[in-house]
Every structure is written in structure tokens, then in C-alpha cells.
Image (cartoon, grey):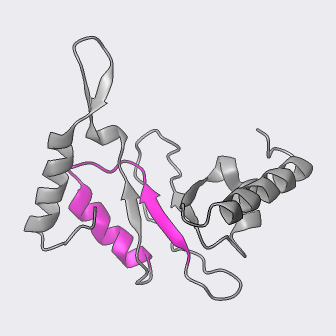
Amino acid sequence: ALFGTDEGAERVVKNVRAVCEANPALEFIVQRNAQTRALWERLAPAPPRNLSFLYDESMGFGASPESWPAPERARDGAAPLFGYAGGLSPANIIEQLDAMVASSTGLPFWIDMESSLRTELADGSDAFDVNKASQCIARLVLAGVAPSV
């Protein structure tokens, strides 16, 4: 990885900060897990205001954690932009969302559930399935949650 050494991590962090500062109207996301620790540990104390952290220890393998991590505030006390991912699906969204709310310390967050909202097509490829996304929204609405999409 580019940030596998201290020198490489510092270089990547410097570049991430520069890109964020040059594009203040865009939100950038850094996946926060064991593989990217050298990157997010350097950014978390004073993140650019348009940088979100995606808590995803599953690293794309679709496994939910036993508990969702609480977000870290910046050194200046600012609330972070952040989201959660890992094993989320239409079948478990309510249960997992309740756990995320409990861990989020009252801060707003977003969720990422890409893989469970895809359907394999006849040719072996996959595509985003709006019906699966609609199932999630319907479950949230029925549970009294007003999702912001």
C-alpha cells in the first residue's frame, strides 16, 4: 500500500488534505479499518471538514461487526462526518440501524450497503437492484424511521 510506511502515509495524508481543500464542495470518504489505519489515524485528529470516515472492518466482505464503533471527535471537538458499512441488508437493516444509533453518540451518520443491494444477472454480471433498495426504505418507513436518501 502507498501508506504502508510512515513516509508513504504522510505523503498520502498530505495529498488527501490538499484534494479536500481544493474541492470544498465535495465530500470525500476514507474507509476506516485495519488496512487503512496508518491513513485514518493521521487524519482523525484534525480531518478536513469535507472528509467522512466509513467504519467498515469487513473491508467489503459483507460481515457486520459485533458492535459498531463510536465516532471520534476531532481535536477541536468538531463532530466527524461518518458512516457505517458491513453486512447490511434488507433483512437486518432495522436491527443493525438500532445498534448504529446506540453507538453513534447522537451524531448523524450515513450507511453504505452496496453489495446486498445488487442482483446477479443472467450473464454473470451484477447490477444495482432498485427493488432491494426499496425494500430497505419500506422496512425503515414501517419501523418509523425517516431515511434521508
- Residue 54 in sight here: yes
Confirm whether the magenta stretch covers residue 94. yes
The residue under the point 85% across, 52% down is 11
- In the image, residue 59 sits, relative to residue 67, either above or below, namely above
| Picture quadrant of residue 92 | bottom left
Q: Residue furthest top?
A: 123
Please tell me which residue is depicted at 71% across the width and 84% down the height of the picture: 75
Location of residue 114 by image quarter = top left
**37 drawn magenta:** no
**Measured along the vertical axis of the image, is residue 77 above or below residue 146?**
below
Q: Position of residue 89 (x, y in %)?
A: 27, 48
Against 96, residue 129 (above or below) is above
The mark total stands at 0
Position of 126 compared to 29: left or right? left
Identity of the residue furthest to the left in this view:
142
Residue 94 or residue 136, whichever sits in front: 136
Q: Residue furthest bottom?
A: 77
Above or below, 2 relative to 147 = above
Give how far across and how far down residue 90 sits, in percent. Answer: 20, 49
Pinpoint residue 73: horizontal percent, then vertical percent.
61, 81
Query: Picture quarter containing residue 119?
Result: top left
Seen at 29% across and 29% down, the residue is: 127
Q: Quadrant of the N terminus?
A: top right
Residue displayed at 38% across by 59% down? 111
At which x and y percent is residue 78? Answer: 60, 85
The answer to whether residue 101 is left or right of residue 137 is right
Q: Quadrant of the C terminus?
A: bottom left
| Magenta stretch in the rendered image | 80-104
Whether residue 69 is visible: no
